[in-house]
């Protein structure tokens, strides 16, 4: 069964989990590109995967049928995946994978409203829940819009962009991605090889789906279980696509690897220097090869970081 989405850094992900046995957790199932390849590679692993996109779940359920009882899918935000793990399963987890990106199908489907060329303006991962990007553009105050464009798009001219949107929505409702893209066409980002509409759309998508909150809660959930000794000898692999996500993963892994947790102002350690949860496997993030980028341009911004819980 062919996938409508090309999984990024697939060779690298397979290499990370090549020797794994036991239970793998795919926190971001999507169209089962990574999951199916991991199950094909190693018949010594079982898999639990989650997603909140009904279309992706329906497709992946069919794709993973051939693996029978080796694969289980649950509908859930990835931050809540552990709530779906049965008693006794947590201790069997030897790998956790999260691909924190939008699938190609979501980007390309006109009605999902993720693309700059869409006729809609939705951007919800779960189309049944929450506010859409159109709702945010219509209802957020100028200050709220400025906040998300500054914090999630890292736009230095966020105030002017927010003011422009507020002015334009007074003239007529902004209901399509194409309409919003055209409104933003006068703005420029200096010193960066990315357009203002792309960064505004990134900011809206993050706000709609609480993407950074989701990642933060997932990292916290992993940390809590690791501290409780429930994830022994477990590899954690996270693929991010922009600096906000990558920074969060990088800092979490550094924190997990730290032996000493004493305040920096102390002259000497008083905590016992025994707080490390494991080790960082990737000192620098793994990125796509030129061959992969040629086949899938969307892999260019992908970064994979790996941590091993002891």
Image (spheres, helix red, strand yellow):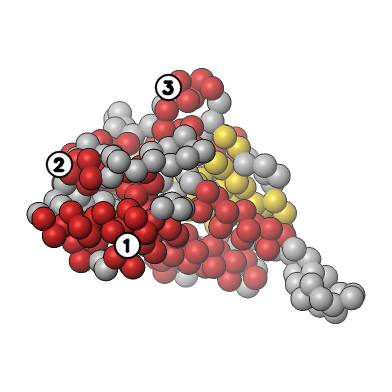
Residue 279: x, y in percent?
Answer: 72, 54
Does residue 171 appear to the left or right of 281 in the view shown? left
Query: Which one is in front, 123 or 217?
Result: 123
SS of the residue under disc 1: helix
Which one is closest to the eye, mark 3 or mark 1? Answer: 1
SS of the residue under disc 3: helix
Query: Which one is in front, 280 or 34?
Result: 280
Residue located at (43% from left, 65% from top): 213
Find disc 3 in the rendering and name its residue.
295
Residues at marks 3 and 1, CA–CA distance in whole angstroms: 36 Å
Which one is closest to the eye, mark 3 or mark 2? Answer: 2
Locate residue 181: give its quadrant.
top left
Residue 280: x, y in percent?
Answer: 70, 51
Residue located at (60% from left, 46% from top): 305
Sequence-first tag of 1 and 2 = 2
Which label number is shown at residue 119? 2
Find disc 1 in the rendering and name its residue.
145
Residues at marks 3 and 2, CA–CA distance in whole angstroms: 27 Å
Placement of 7 over or under 210, stated as above or below: above
SS of the residue under disc 2: loop
Residue located at (25% from left, 66% from top): 140
Locate residue 298: give its quadrant.
top left
Question: Dots 3 and 2: beta carbons under 8 Å?
Answer: no
Q: Residues within 10 Å of mark 2 (few under 14, many from 20)?
A: some
Residue located at (39% from left, 64% from top): 147
Which label number is shown at residue 234? none
Residue 108: x, y in percent?
Answer: 25, 36
Question: Dots 3 and 1: beta carbons under 8 Å?
Answer: no
Which one is closest to the eye, mark 1 or mark 2? Answer: 1
Query: Which one is in front, 11 or 147?
Result: 147
Does residue 231 appear to the left or right of 1 in the view shown? right
């Amino acid at each position: 069964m062919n996938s409508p989405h090309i999984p990024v850094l697939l060779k690298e992900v397979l290499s990370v989990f090549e020797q794994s046995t036991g239970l793998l957790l795919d926190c971001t199932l999507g169209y089962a590109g990574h999951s199916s390849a991991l199950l094909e590679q190693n018949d010594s692993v079982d898999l639990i995967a989650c997603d909140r996109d009904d279309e992706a779940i329906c497709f992946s359920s069919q794709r993973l049928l051939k693996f029978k009882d080796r694969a289980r899918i649950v509908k859930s935000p990835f931050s809540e995946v552990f709530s779906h793990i049965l008693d006794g399963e947590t201790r069997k987890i030897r790998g956790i994978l999260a691909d924190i990106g939008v699938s190609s199908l979501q980007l390309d489907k006109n009605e999902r409203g993720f693309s700059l060329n869409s006729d809609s303006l939705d951007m919800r991962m779960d189309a049944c829940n929450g506010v859409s990007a159109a709702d945010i553009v219509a209802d957020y105050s100028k200050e709220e819009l400025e906040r998300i464009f500054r914090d999630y798009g890292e736009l230095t001219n966020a105030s002017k962009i927010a003011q422009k949107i507020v002015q334009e929505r007074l003239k007529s409702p902004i209901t399509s991605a194409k309409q919003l893209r055209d409104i933003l066409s006068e703005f420029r980002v200096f010193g960066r090889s990315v357009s203002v509409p792309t960064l505004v759309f990134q900011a809206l998508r993050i706000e709609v789906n609480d993407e950074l909150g989701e990642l933060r809660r997932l990292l916290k959930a992993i940390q809590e279980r690791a501290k409780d000794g429930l994830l022994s000898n477990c590899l954690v692999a996270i693929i991010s696509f922009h600096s906000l996500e990558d920074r969060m993963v990088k800092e979490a892994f550094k924190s997990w690897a730290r032996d000493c947790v004493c305040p920096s102002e102390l002259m000497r350690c008083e905590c016992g220097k025994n707080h490390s949860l494991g080790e960082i496997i990737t000192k620098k993030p793994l990125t796509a090869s030129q061959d992969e980028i040629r086949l899938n341009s969307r892999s260019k911004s992908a970064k994979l970081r790996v941590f091993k819980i002891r």
